[in-house]
Image (spheres, helix red, strand yellow):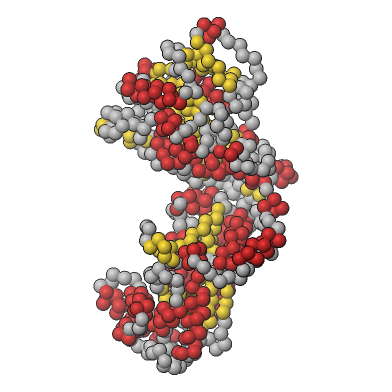
Amino acid sequence: MNVVPEDVLKFSGIGCSSKSPTYFLNRTFGFNSLHGRMPSIATGALFADARMKGIGVSGDGDTASIGMGQFKHVMRRNVNLVYIVENNGVYGLTKGQFSATAEKGLHLKKQGENPYMPVDICMEALVSNATFVARSFAGNPKQVKELLKAALSHHGIAVLDIISPCVTFNNQENAYHSYAWGKDHEEPLHEISYIAPRSEIMLEQEMMDGEIREVTMHDGSAVILKNLEKGYDPTNRQEALRVLEEAQQNNWLLTGLIYLNTAKPALTDIYELVDTPLNRLGESDLRPERALLDKINALMF
Amino acid sequence: MTEFAGLAYYTEVPVVIWDVQRIGPSTGLPTRTSQGDLTFTYFIGHGDSNSVILLPGDVSECFEFGWKSFDIAERLQTPVFVLSDLDMGMNQWMSKPFQYPESSMDRGKILWEKDIEEIKGNWGRYLDKDGDGIPYRSLPGNKHPMSAYFTRGTGHDEYARYTEDSETYLRVMARLKNKHETARKYMPKPVLHSMAGATVGILSFGSTENAILEARHMLAAEHGIKAEFLRVRALPFIDEVTDFIEKYEQIFVVEMNRDGQMNQVLLTEYPQFAARFKSVAYQDGLPASAKWVREGILAKYETVVVSDQKSVISDQKSVAGDRKAKGGAQKKPSAKKTASAAKAGSPSKKDAAKSSTKTKKPGRKTAVKSKKK
């Protein structure tokens, strides 16, 4: 995708997940911030230089418990940020307590049974008007890769809820966030392929046979979705909520590009920002003339 | 906010935070003024941290500290707290016209692409090149391949790399302490109101200035107590504050809160002068009045006849006596009680007598002979 490290900013909150940004893009500025408050750091930094693309990595504890408030607002503001949730249903760093995404009835050796309903991160993102919502499964790396590319091409907030089993504390065969269960219960909405901008789209024979949907991204790239069992329109928000509800009822691990809206402006687009990044503005750009203060003084005194 | 403040201190991110104080805790008296957030701000952050605090005293100074706080924060790469209060923030004030900044904007030590190219990328985010404790920084969006670093609240070395190494930690924390020393250079100087023949000092901050000036006038005219008055405008303290404290055996620390928070900070920073500070702390939500300032000072005023030693002893006794009477529930009961009595209208002679057994308190119209050595 020719991602230039200097054009990207990395962010994370606190948790196992949030250590991830130290492992990629070493020439990129990064900020491992506070628990649940990555969105506010990202929002500020991406304002300071609105040309930058943000990649944020969070976890289910970081996002769905302490960070729920910030999560909802970074969605509705449509910050130009890929928001990855490494979702495993447990607090791994503190020895495996239930997180807010753990399914009801989950039994863990030291914790007993989880009595609460889980938070569905994709559903929360959707009702908060996120413009790109996807779920994937770490056991399906091809799909993760294609969705990541599509998310990077999106202009605005892109949520990737990646079910990422914690092999230490929550990988029992019957657990929602485990490899075994995920492999058995994954219900992909479609097969997804990412096509970089300007390259000619060549569809493989097997894809041409199925029902194909092409979605054009902000940067001119395309996402090709091959529908599997049912025709699914990822630009229909109501339909997106319906399939998530259906998946919850039937205990499916629904994966794929659940929702996409490329028409909404990103946060910094709706402000009349100057072309120069805000953090490069100097005194001549920022300090009003002496005459203006005289005028203000004359009005008041 | 506390967690972010501590993070900003340790990661050295400049930030300006205005606190227009009202009475706490929690919602407190939402429409009433206060100076009750001083110690909260002074000690803010988990672990060891030092705060830079600006203390404007009127509306014009609020304007001035508006731009100055950013200069200081970016110069020092640390949070700067500005403590205004509800009286200045929401009530109508007489004010001098706002002054146009006399100095240029200061963005501090920032490296852009050409700067990093010049030093051939040889730099570290937390490296103290100038010996003043202030490192250099680059900003996100800088396209030089050597410009980026990783900011983290976890232990880090001079190159912003993760470490839990004890010696590195000690080194970084010592540099931050050194930076706080450097901070003193950038603090606005206090405002001194001198008075010929002054024998005591009054120290305050913020919006209480006018009330104190009026009270000071009454103290001189009606009680013969002449006081020099210093309005502190920033923390950490600078030499001018130390010089003032060294000058007087009695310094009345006037502030709008219950526990005498500026007094607590002074006791921490100047333990060698602890006996000099006399807390005149009172708050009921209303802007400071000359009346309570005057009564509060009178309640604590000691006519030192023999020696410093004696005044110290009598002061200690009064505190102990009061604690006994109150069952030790309050830290500085005499200050609050006499002040609230004063607010109610008349200075309670009983309280005055109790709070200082060995010294004579001047009555309202009694001329006082203030004999300092």
Asked where in the image residue B197 lies, by quadrant, the reply is bottom right
**Relative to B299, B143 lies left or right:** right
**Relative to B9, B25 lies left or right:** left
Residue B245 seen in the figure: no
Residue that appears at 44% across and 35% down: A128
Asked where in the image residue A193 lies, by quadrant, the reply is top right
Residue that appears at 41% across and 78% down: B292
Image location of residue B143, percent across then percent down: 67, 38
Residue B221 seen in the figure: yes
Image location of residue B363, percent across then percent down: 38, 90
Q: Give the answer, above or below, for where B315 lies relative to A119.
A: below
Image location of residue B77, percent across then percent down: 58, 53
User: Between A166 and B233, which is closer to the camera in this rendering?
Assistant: B233
Residue that appears at 45% across and 26% down: A237
Q: Quadrant of the C terminus of chain A?
A: bottom right
Q: Give the answer, above or below, for where A298 lies relative to A161.
A: below
Tell me how many marks there are.
0
User: Between B167 and B237, which is closer to the camera in this rendering?
Assistant: B237
Q: Give the answer, above or below, for where A297 lies relative to A216.
A: below
Image location of residue B339, percent across then percent down: 37, 77
User: Between B118 and A83, which is closer to the camera in this rendering?
Assistant: A83
Q: In which quarter of the image is the N terminus of chain A?
A: top right
Residue that appears at 61% across and 54% down: B74
